[in-house]
Image (cartoon, helix red, strand yellow):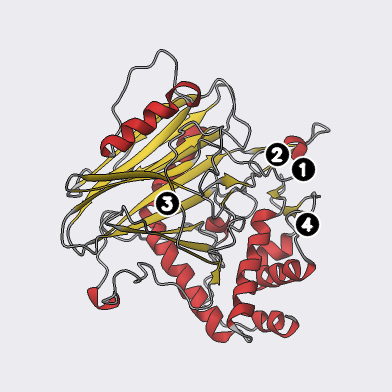
Amino acid sequence: MRHIVRSIVRCPVRHTETISFPSGTRAGNPCEFAEPRGMIPEDNSVAPLFRIPACAADWTNRHEEGIPAGGFGSGTFTLDGSGAFRRWRIAPPGGVGEQDAVVPGNRFHVFQQQGNRTSAATLGMDGDSGPESPFNNGAQVVPVRRQALFPFTWTRYEHPDWPAILESCSFSPTIPYRYRETSLPLWIHTWRAHNPTSEPVTVALMLTWEFAHPTTESGVEFDLHHDRKCISGILRVPGRDDRFCVAVPDVGSVPRAEEQIEGWRRDVDGKSLWSDFAADGMLRPTVRTQPPAALAAVIHFSLAPGEIREFPFVVAWHFPVYHFADGREVRRYPPFIDKRVPDNIVVDLASEAMARYRDWKEMLQEWQAAFIQQTLGGMEDISALLNALGYFGSANTVWTEDNRFTVLPDDGKGLQSSARRKAAFACLARFWSDLSKRLIV
């Protein structure tokens, strides 16, 4: 590992040191996607829908593993291989420690229909949602392939009852030399669906989300925002600045696609929400006697024979203060996030991610390609080096009032090993040198 860590410092990756907002965005609707057919192998049953580097780690049978979501110092959670959201560092009690608990209401769900045949399932391990699941649907699908190379995680889903193949690519915009993007409390989960059959297929994707981190809060309110790029659902507790936001693209101008976000309550609506979605892949708006305390975001679309379509989901959050047991407070976010109304902050972050996620992904792919080409060592060594950067997501990192990037005292779960820690700090010094100079350990 030692000679590989030294080689990182010499890696001549394109250097665009900046903390300003990059100008220009990719034109077109975020849902418009056309993969060149020449890039898809004829054997559609095994063809990857994303370009995945050969050195990506195979985590198919390592369900506990996951690349942490969120920028450096912005708070984090992890989507593991079982489909569960866990390892929370959004607002830990006393400011110390990872809370490794599953939020039962946070799940991805899939509906598919071809002709008169329908199938609906929650993505996860058989029985892993347990008796606490608000859905209690019993039908679950596990990934057939799962790979990771920081900051990307690629997951492929197939099922005998599904005519369409699904793959996801999730990441946060931790882009070298771009300090603003690297620190944002954002997570993008992009889905691609491929219909390898000769008949049309209808597909619906749903993300359900609670205001929990991981303890479920009471008195939660739900609100809906709509701009020209996306529809955003916001969960908040009155009197506090804390926010969760889930966004889906506005597909009003996209043929054969619909989107919606609805509120629901885990204690009374879970089973009916699932039954509603499983019937046709859509949710009926309902009038509730109690305010919703969770949300469900849905993208519903059709696939022509041989077609591939792409749709992103975005999760943004705003938990701006880190509380310690002794009453001290540390600001969590860097100066790149203004002191605006919290609802505006998460909506603006989600809208920016919806507009720029492809540009961010392309920058990260270019960086990875240069890193792989210039770094010494075998594929497993290169993968271990890049994935070591997940340390700064799993470690207890914050931004202080004087804009210092800080690794706080911890329970040790984020460290994992001294070799991983050394590799992570070596990568930080090379690709985020300003953060490294301001780092307090």
Query: How busy is the neighbourhood of tag 1: few (under 14 within 10 Å), some, or many (20 plus)?
Result: some
Query: How busy is the neighbourhood of tag 3: few (under 14 within 10 Å), some, or many (20 plus)?
Result: many
Residue 337 seen in render: yes
Residue 219's place in the image compared with 363, above or below, is above
Tell me where residue 226 appears, x and y as whole percent: 33, 36
Q: Which mark lies nearer to you, 3 or 1?
A: 1
Q: Is residue 420 left or right of residue 197?
A: right
Q: Mark 2 points at which residue?
A: 92
Q: Mark 1 points at which residue?
A: 96
Determine whether the residue tagged by mark 4 lies in a helix, strand or loop: loop
Tell me where residue 128 appears, x and y as whole percent: 55, 44
Q: Name the residue under label 3.
A: 353
Q: Which of marks 3 and 1 is nearer the N terminus?
A: 1
Q: Which mark lies nearer to you, 3 or 4?
A: 3
Q: Name the residue under label 4.
A: 440
**Residue 242 lies in what quarter of the image?**
top right
Tell me where residue 47 appears, x and y as whole percent: 34, 71
Of 200 and 283, which appears nearest the observer? Answer: 200
Q: Earlier in the sequence, mark 1 or mark 4?
A: 1
